[in-house]
Image (spheres, coloured by chain):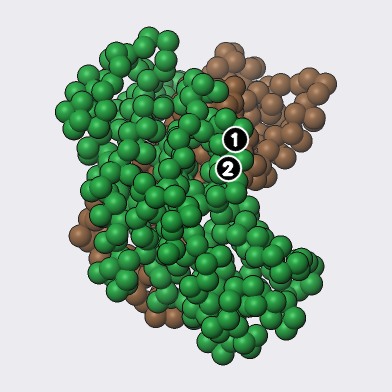
Chain colours: A brown, B green
Amino acid sequence: MDFILEGIKQAIMLLVEGNPEIVHIMFLSLRVSGIATLISLIIGLPVGTFLALAEFPSKKLWISMINTGMALPPVAVGLFVSIMLWRSGPLGNLRLMYTPSAIIIAQTIIAAPVVTGLTLTALQQLNPRLKLQLYGLGASRIQMILTLWREARLPLLATVIAGFGSVISEVGASMMVGGNLRYHTRVLTTAIVLETSKGQFAIAIALSLILLLLAYTVNLWLTWLQQRNSQK
Amino acid sequence: MYNCYATIIQIDLHKMRKFFLATLISIAVMMTTNACSPVAIINPTTAPLSNAKTPHLEEKTHSGTHIVSPVNMNQIHSNEIILATTTSTRDSGLLDILVPQFEKQSGYTVKIIAVGSGQALQMGKEGNADVLLVHSPSSEEEFMTAGYGIQDSLVMYNDFVIVGPADDLAGIKGKTSTEAFKSIYTTKSLFISRGDDSGTHSREKQIWKKVELTPDPKNGWYLESGSGMTDTLRIASEKHGYTLTDRATYLSLKDTLSLEILVEGDKSLLNIYSVITVNPQKFPMVNHEGAESFADFMLSPDTQIIIAEFGKEKFGQSLFTPAAGKTEAELGK
């Protein structure tokens, strides 16, 4: 039990003195997961919107596939991306294996279905007549979509939060495709695994607390964005 | 109501544009910062021939390790090498000391992938690593005869030990490794096996073979952890079981374990580490120059001294004994 107190003490120490390695690990985690979330937003927002609004025969099939994708196990994604990126794999020439870019690719694959699926749900729960009404007002298609996004902004921000949460906390894929290389691809979660296996429990707990703090800060900001206008 | 939506649409377009612009800019900024920091340092694919090529060539000839032939345009050059290694060299902290020194001397960036020896050799077979640091002599032999490697040199050795709880219910303390395994088998004492085809695991299987016993993981007393040495030691410690471990990993974790060395000094417990360079003929992407330079570094007298000294301060004994230039038969005498 002493580990926990010791861990809290160490976490504060590491943060206060700005230990360069910890700072590097923190910013790498934030950057990698941030970029992965942004890319999955760029993919997921339009795809989710399309699936919510368009009507076509195989729609239900696609939706069920996206929903399954929301439960993609990170290790399976890690394995798939590794096979692709290994030198012996089809994309081996890009030499992306064991780089932060490889982690971004894997995390994007993990987060994109989450963002797509939740965008779809967010838009489907809007009153379907809103779309017709907007067209009736002479809105163009883009204007209509933007208005729908605005209407669903609360669940859409929840989508961003869920997408970011799913990748910042993920360890399986980061470990496999990143390799947990010190100063290169060591992120908070993989560092926690390493320190635990080395028996450095206090540092592992400190890193866990830092990870929680980081996730909390990002979510605090997103929640602030989300709740800012909701009272009006 | 209708007017309300009409104004929202107008405001929206204005706001949304700003929002998208901001998002795009932030993505661009993040991408560029990403591109010029770690990715670019370890992954100079954009300009493989011009990037950092000249300085590192100069440096290499400077230090006199070997003379580099002119750059061959057909070969993919890179200043990064992938080192696939057994977990013990990393977990004991040895590589944390040696690799930065090698990087400084040679200009190469080393990516250490710490896996079991079995997986490390597999990575070499598929050209996914340039140089290997492993301790599984029988699998290494197979690897070399199949032509996957070019050079296979002894670097250092230490020994395996059998560790277990202090109360030692199987009564193996002071026995030889074969006797110890037999009494663990007959008393059905808990034994944690690596179960991951690592060098340690293959040694364990060798001993079981020697005593002509095959423990079945379904029996309940013989467990396979399927993880690295540190995790396996932790499981053995928590469950009061026995396990076979390399001395270096055990010593570096000793303070957090409730396990003691019960069997040691047996000749069949010798643990030999070799450095292997992967054959670039099979995989043109393999960085053979880098691999050779790493192997030379590991075998150089200066490095061998560092290896001999490593751990003395912290553990009161060195974790590895240097063995460059020796043969397997000469060791342990």
Label 2 sits on residue: B141
Q: Residue furthest top?
A: B73
Q: Amino acid at mark 2?
A: Glu
The C terminus of chain B lies in quadrant: bottom left
Q: Nearer the viewer, residue A205 or B158?
A: B158
| Residue A177 position in % (x across, y down) | 51, 39
B97 on left or right of B234: left
Label 1 sits on residue: B145
Between marks 1 and 2, how big is the CA–CA gap? 6 Å
SS under mark 2: helix
Q: Nearer the viewer, residue B289 or A16?
A: B289
Q: Chain of mark 1?
A: B
**Which residue is depicted at the point 71% across and 21% down?**
A54
Q: Amino acid at mark 1?
A: Thr
Taking B317 as reference, is A124 above or below it? Answer: above
A60 on left or right of B234: right
Taking A57 as reference, is A160 above or below it? Answer: below
| Residue A197 position in % (x across, y down) | 47, 63
Q: Which mark is residue B198?
A: none
Taking A3 as reference, is A36 above or below it? Answer: above
Among the 4 quarters of the image, the one containing residue B319? bottom left
Among the 4 quarters of the image, the one containing residue A139? top right
A1 on left or right of A52: left
